[in-house]
């Protein structure tokens, strides 16, 4: 088993085939959550898994679970997975690499007819990106109980279309209960989406922590008025106020180590060049690996909104819609052991982006495997990871999952054994009973 390796070429072909679904002219992917393109990608994933004798189930928020049976299917399974939805100008690797590294692990086990001690589960999580519907990691967050199912299914996109209706339309509004998979460990492979592994020339990132995230919907309400007849001192200019807040968000990040602040979405009303904007709605994304610093940044943002409202005689509504608390991955050492066994260069790192594994860590021992990406670029059509880098990540995933499966079987075997040992002292339980109990 130590010499088992995934098939680099087959993984690359899978990535390029999946990348054709929603392909953009600049070589990226535009495959928004619960869109027809997302359906096509999901269907392809399901077909690939069924071709390797998996059973497939869909839960009530559209998460997909493909299960490959093991020797003892009563034991908790080892899971892996990521997401297939992309940013509007996304790449071929964000999320997709983690899903297809899982498929490549599946194919490697299948073609070598390896029966793993436990079942293995390969998953796709709904709307990890949080671009079309908010928040991010919506499917995994709802699965672990961080979000309310009905509330999330009622979320709408900017055209007022409901997530629940879209999942139904694309055939992925399942009936499986959330949180019901019997898993004992979860691992997610993902491109780093930053420059560190490339700069440090490391093949693998052992992800120790997922940083904290706070998202906001901010609405500035001024007074629409004629751009040619309204003196500057009489204006209630929603755009000027919004721009002041955007600039202040950038300034506040200078005050704290590792602080990040981004305004990525903005909607202007009435959006006419000769009318002073009456209303500007925009997003704010604050991040920090330290929960206390992120809380201080949150308070600073609220103070900025009050200050601008007062100084510029506008109304500012700052709606804090999502808080993701920094998370430590408690199965990172499994990833490190497999990486060292395989001889790949590696370093500890923390995740700047959110990931589905960040929520799975609520339920089971969880780890993440990072691979480098070219110039640290992501959420960009130029996103790129080489076949060799992808293969390294998938090999680490394969051996991390195999080791976890062995460990779970031993743990349970030991429990059974210790239980049986207790019983043997009392009533001579036979080996047959042990096998019966394990199977
Ligand atoms: O926002 C994030 O970090 C991720 O791309 N959903
Ligand atoms: Mn991602
Ligand atoms: Mn992303």
Image (tube, rainbow, N blue to C red):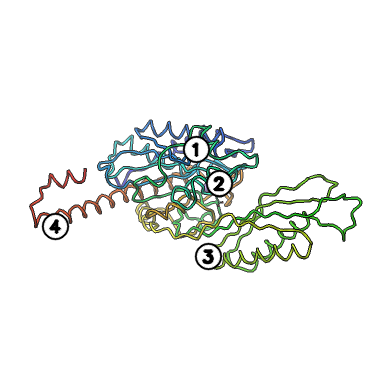
Q: Which element is circle 3 on? A: helix
Which circle, 1 or 3, is nearer the viewer? 3
In 3D space, how far apart are the residues under numbered discs 4 and 2 (Cα atoms)?
50 Å
**Residues under numbered marks 4 and 3 in contact, where contact means CB atoms less than 8 Å apart:** no
Which circle, 1 or 4, is nearer the viewer? 4
Residue that carries the numbered disc 4 in the rendered image: 422
Q: Earlier in the sequence, mark 1 or mark 3?
A: 1
Percent position of residue 106, x then y:
37, 39
Q: Determine whether 111 is above or below 229 in the image.
A: above
Ligand 1: does it lie within 8 Å of the C-beta at label 2? yes
Q: Earlier in the sequence, mark 4 or mark 3?
A: 3
In 3D space, how far apart are the residues under numbered discs 4 and 3 (Cα atoms)?
46 Å
Foreground of the two, 196 or 300: 300
In 3D space, how far apart are the residues under numbered discs 2 and 1 (Cα atoms)?
18 Å
Q: Earlier in the sequence, mark 4 or mark 2?
A: 2
Query: Which numbered disc covers residue 129?
Result: 2
Query: Which numbered disc covers residue 411?
Result: none
Residue that carries the numbered disc 3 in the rendered image: 291
Q: Quadrant of residue 255?
A: bottom right
Q: Which element is circle 4 on? A: helix
Q: Quadrant of residue 244?
A: bottom right
**Residues under numbered marks 1 and 3 in contact, where contact means CB atoms less than 8 Å apart:** no
């Amino acid at each position: 088993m130590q010499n088992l390796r995934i098939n680099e070429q087959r993984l690359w072909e899978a990535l390029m085939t999946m990348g054709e679904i929603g392909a953009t002219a600049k070589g990226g992917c535009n495959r928004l959550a619960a869109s027809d393109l997302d359906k096509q990608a999901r269907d392809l994933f399901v077909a690939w898994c069924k071709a390797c004798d998996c059973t497939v189930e869909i839960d009530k928020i559209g998460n997909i679970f493909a299960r490959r049976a093991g020797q003892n299917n009563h034991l908790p399974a080892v899971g892996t997975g990521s997401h297939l939805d992309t940013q509007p100008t996304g790449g071929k690797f964000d999320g997709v690499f983690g899903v297809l590294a899982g498929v490549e692990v599946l194919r490697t086990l299948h073609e070598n007819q390896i029966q793993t001690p436990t079942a293995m589960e390969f998953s796709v999580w709904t709307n990890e990106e949080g671009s079309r519907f908010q928040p991010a990691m919506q499917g995994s967050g709802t699965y672990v109980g961080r979000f309310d199912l009905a509330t999330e299914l009622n979320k709408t996109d900017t055209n007022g279309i409901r997530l629940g209706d879209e999942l139904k339309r694309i055939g992925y509004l399942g009936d499986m209960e959330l949180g019901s998979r019997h898993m004992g460990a979860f691992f997610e492979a993902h491109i780093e989406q930053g420059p560190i592994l490339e700069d440090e020339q490391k093949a693998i990132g052992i992800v120790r922590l997922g940083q904290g995230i706070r998202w906001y919907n901010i609405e500035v309400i001024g007074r629409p008025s004629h751009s040619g007849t309204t003196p500057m001192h009489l204006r209630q200019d929603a755009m000027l106020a919004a721009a002041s807040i955007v600039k202040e968000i950038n300034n506040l990040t200078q005050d704290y180590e590792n602080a990040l602040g981004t305004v990525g979405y903005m909607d202007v009303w009435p959006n006419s060049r000769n009318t002073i904007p009456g209303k500007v709605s925009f997003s704010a994304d604050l991040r920090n690996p330290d929960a206390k610093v992120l809380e201080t940044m949150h308070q600073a943002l609220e103070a900025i909104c009050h200050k601008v409202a007062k100084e510029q005689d506008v109304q500012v509504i700052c709606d804090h819609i999502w808080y993701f608390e920094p998370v430590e991955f408690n199965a990172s050492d499994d990833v490190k052991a497999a990486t060292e066994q395989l001889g790949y260069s590696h370093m500890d790192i923390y995740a700047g982006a959110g990931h589905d594994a960040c929520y799975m860590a609520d339920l089971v021992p969880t780890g993440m495997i990072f691979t480098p990406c070219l110039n640290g670029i992501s959420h960009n059509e130029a996103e790129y990871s080489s076949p060799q880098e992808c293969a390294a990540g998938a090999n680490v995933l394969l051996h991390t999952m195999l080791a976890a499966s062995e460990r779970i079987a031993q743990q349970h075997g030991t429990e059974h054994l210790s239980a049986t040992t207790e019983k043997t002292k009392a009533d001579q339980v036979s080996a047959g009973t042990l096998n019966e109990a394990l199977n």
